[in-house]
Image (tube, rainbow, N blue to C red):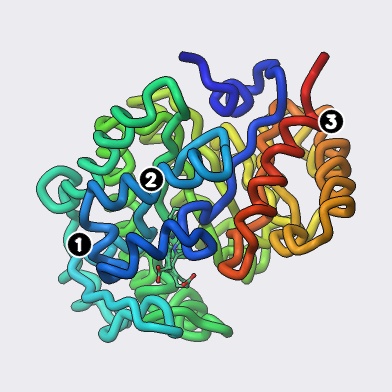
Amino acid sequence: MDYTFLKACRGEETDYTPIWIMRQAGRYLPEYHTVRDKVTFLELCKTPELAAEVSIQPVDIIGVDAAIMFSDILVPIEKMGAHLEFREKQGPVFPSPIRDQAAVDRLGIPDPEDDLGYVMDTIRILRRELEGKAPLIGFSGAPFTLATYLIEGGSSRTFLNTKMMMYNDPGLYKSLMDKITDCTTTYLKGQIAAGVQALQIFDSWVGILAPCDFAEFALPYVNRIITELKKVSDIPIIYFANNGATLIEQSLTSGADVLGIDWRINLSDVVKRVDGRAAIQGNMEPLALFLPPDKLEKRIANVLEEAKGARGHIFNLGHGIVQQTDPEKAKLAVELVHKLSRRA
Ligand code: CP3
């Protein structure tokens, strides 16, 4: 089965523009809460039957063209040996941040099947249940974004500790990034072996870097992962550098097949700068889903128009869907993307 989403990733002609939504499996869906109310977030990630169930919900309920496995970018990091908690209203917390060589040396490289078997089982269940219905996207965080959580001990506003380590102790920073890169490469190879049909690498915080720091402290590690993955598989790889409008030319050298684009830039601009060297994914402002239907339709038509000339376009939001979104609006957006993009 050749799915529209996969064809668009490869830059092939499609009958319509496919759409999926970052964070599509989650709290804006009442059906997610029904499952989530019985378990903690990490338990949900670690119970393959339940993780598979919530991954399929957006395919069935809002009609997206691809499923993304339900997990979190920090799940493999926990298995490197860094204790992780998800706290209500605070999000992810690592109570013992990584700030010295001894702490880096204590981190291990988890084995996908032995240590992260629940993720691999989720993938296997999903491939069975999605057969003929939708392709499955696997994912990881990018090394820089993952490192910020480990170094800061959680989310951050200034990323002070991360930048201090980069500038004051580049050897320590590099040894941490090397380890996260090895962990991520192994983990993504495991996901490929378990059956994912595309991969997205989330670089949620990379937009806080100056272009020269991106070149030195973030991009080479993404490039290393993609180079290794391309040796074992030709599934499409999407690199999403959030807030990365200034980093597009550099991001193209990552080796990704698709660049994920946030909403702070016009896609027409991106199409010109990418110039057929990758497919593009994005980029409607997530809160545009709060517009009334007629204005939402115009917004979607505009994104589709701007993407014309791209070598492959996958519609998405410019970042994750927010919790307060009306699921009916998300469903309407999917229908509108399909209707407005249908080729005669
Ligand atoms: O996209 C999907 O539908 C698949 C599932 C998915 C989740 N997290 C589930 C989740 C994916 C792909 C992620 C990636 C992720 N996790 C990122 C990169 C994407 C992005 O948004 O930039 C990041 C930075 C994280 C780290 C993370 N996880 C944070 C900061 C938080 C707390 C903030 C929040 O949104 O609550 C999480 C928790 C989380 N991950 C939830 C979900 C559904 C909410 C948990 C709950 O049910 O209470």
Can you give x and y, in whole percent of width and height, for residue 181 in the image?
35, 53
Asked if the residues shown at circle 3 and circle 2 are in contact, with their CB atoms under 8 angstroms apart, the answer is no
Say which element carries label 3. loop
Around disc 2, counting alpha carbons within 10 Å, would you say few (fewer than 14), some (14 to 19), or many (20 or more)?
A: many
Measured Cα–Cα span from mark 3 to mark 1: 43 Å
Which mark is first along the chain, 1 or 3?
A: 1
- Horizontal and vertical percent for residue 71? 35, 55
Residue receiving disc 2: 69
First along the sequence among labels 3 and 2: 2
Q: Residue furthest left?
A: 114
Up-down relation of residue 100 to residue 10 (above or below): below
Separation of marks 2 and 1 at Cα, in angstroms: 18 Å
Percent position of residue 182, x then y: 29, 50
Quadrant where the C terminus sits is top right
Q: Which mark is residue 79?
A: 1
| Residue 112 visible from this viewpoint | yes
Does the Cβ of the disc 2 residue fall within 8 Å of ligand 1?
yes
Q: Residue at x 27, y 52 (%)?
A: 50
- State the residue in front, 320 or 290: 290
Quadrant of the image occupied by residue 62: top right
Q: Which residue is at a point 25% across and 68% down the rendered structure image?
A: 39
| Residue type, label 3 | Lys
Q: Disc 1 marks which amino acid?
A: Lys
Amino acid carrying mark 2 in the image: Met
Task: Locate residue 180 relative to residue 335 in the image: left or right.
Answer: left
| Residue denoted by label 3 | 308
- The image position of residue 102, as x and y in percent, is 19, 78
Q: Quadrant of residue 93?
A: bottom left
* Residue nearer the viewer, 151 or 304: 304
* Rendering quarter of residue 287: bottom right
Which quadrant does ligand 1 occupy? bottom left
